[in-house]
Amino acid sequence: MAGLLLLLMFAGVISGIVCGARIIVVLMLVPLFFGLVGSSLGVFDSALFYAIPERIFGVIRNQVLYAIPLFVLMGKLLEHSGLAEKMLLSLTGFSKHKGRSLVLAVLGTSIVIASATGIIGATITMLAGIALPALLRAGVSEKISAGLICAAGSLGQLIPPSIVLILLSDQISNAWILSQRDLGNFAPEPISIANLFAAAILPGLLLAALYAAYLTFVMRPSNINLQVQKNEDLPPLSIEVLFIFGVILLVPLSIIFGVTTASEAASIGVFGTVILILRSLKPNLLKKALMETIELTGVIFGIIIAASVMALVFRGLGGDEIVSTFLFAMPGERTGALLMVMLVIFLLGFIVEFIEIIYIVIPVTAPVLFALGVDPIWFAVMVTINLQISFLTPPLGIALFYFQSVSKIKAMALYEAVLPFIILQILALLIVFAFPIVATWLPSILI
């Protein structure tokens, strides 16, 4: 009976999300309903509901998550102050406005901007407004331009600093400690944000290199120069732009080398950004950035808390035991179980956002995989790449929604445009799967 309730609960959650209901409401109310049903049938202990307040306070007190509002604020300040736009215009100016060189310039600068803002929506809408017209005027097709902006605009979620990596590090660390305790190791080496930041650098650069190789191959040299009119002169590479690049590099490096914690590094990033925009502070800029930060942070933490409630009901119905038995019984043992989890994450990426996947799938499956001998850092990087794929996969790829909101491209044309980049993402995932050292080497020498 408990197994049936679990299936119905997941079906209810997915149906609610697909139908457009608020994710926080779905993740909170559907599990509570099935918990009450399970309690009335004698397969769920209703006393577990008393643990919900403690779980909420646990999320609030989690120091790993303190960095999220600060990184969001840094991104909002860069977006609304125009600094991110200035960086893009300054650096693409070195491309001489030719088709192929401009494409590669947009790829490189958008990766930096995406990692700095940490918010896919802000990056893609900005790129669509600034880079898309320039690409089209330089003779780049709409298909290549759209695919490039969607793919490059979301790549910052793999290259640190990244909100995805921060959220994932919290769950990976918890799962690692749990799995080691079950094996009798009560003092395991923790998995930190620094571990995941260092581990994601080479895979992120690998994926960027695959994008660059593909774009170089498909782009024919264009003789159409971008016509820059007098009122559209591109700004030079100023001290201001160099300073913000320095801040962007300082934030992840200070975390990786153990100089600061994630929240301290994020504070440095916010402080540096505020200092830089003080001279040209627009009216209500800070207020607008703060209000949007509060709103987005509230959504993120709301989803985390709601997913925590769902995880509580899932365990109360014996779901962790069912998953553990299923994964341990997979043919191929460790490899078979790992492939199954990767497949589940890939399929969920079509219909569920990355935060729900991190806080629903990882706590259930990761302890079992770690008990089977899967390296937690290697696993975390593969999950991040897998989630990266979900940003582009129709019908609910978040990058696609943001691009369509500011462009006139039709849905099917956009799906066709991002397909080569999805294939490259899968290729990158397979490379990391076949060669774990791509993810594990840098943390082993730096941390």
Image (tube, helix red, strand yellow):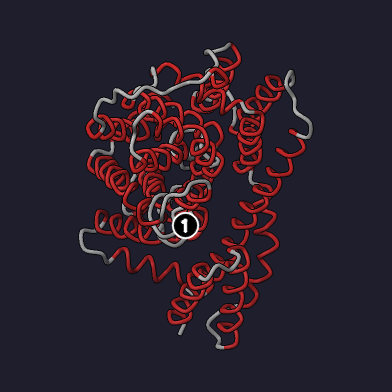
Mark 1 secondary-structure assignment = helix
**Image quarter of the N terminus:** bottom left
Write the residue at 64% across / 54% down.
299
On the image, the x and y values in percent for residue 82 come to 62, 28
**Image quarter of the C terminus:** top left
176 sits to left or right of 47: left
Write the residue at 50% across / 23% down.
257
Asked where in the image residue 429 lies, by quadrant, the reply is top left
Write the residue at 33% across / 38% down.
141
307 sits to left or right of 272: left
On the image, the x and y values in percent for residue 237 come to 52, 13
Q: Which residue is mark 1?
A: 357
Amino acid bearing label 1: Ile
Q: Nearer the viewer, residue 145 or 298?
A: 145
On the image, the x and y values in percent for residue 122 come to 56, 40
Q: Is residue 297 above or below residue 274?
A: below
Q: Nearer the viewer, residue 374 or 169?
A: 169
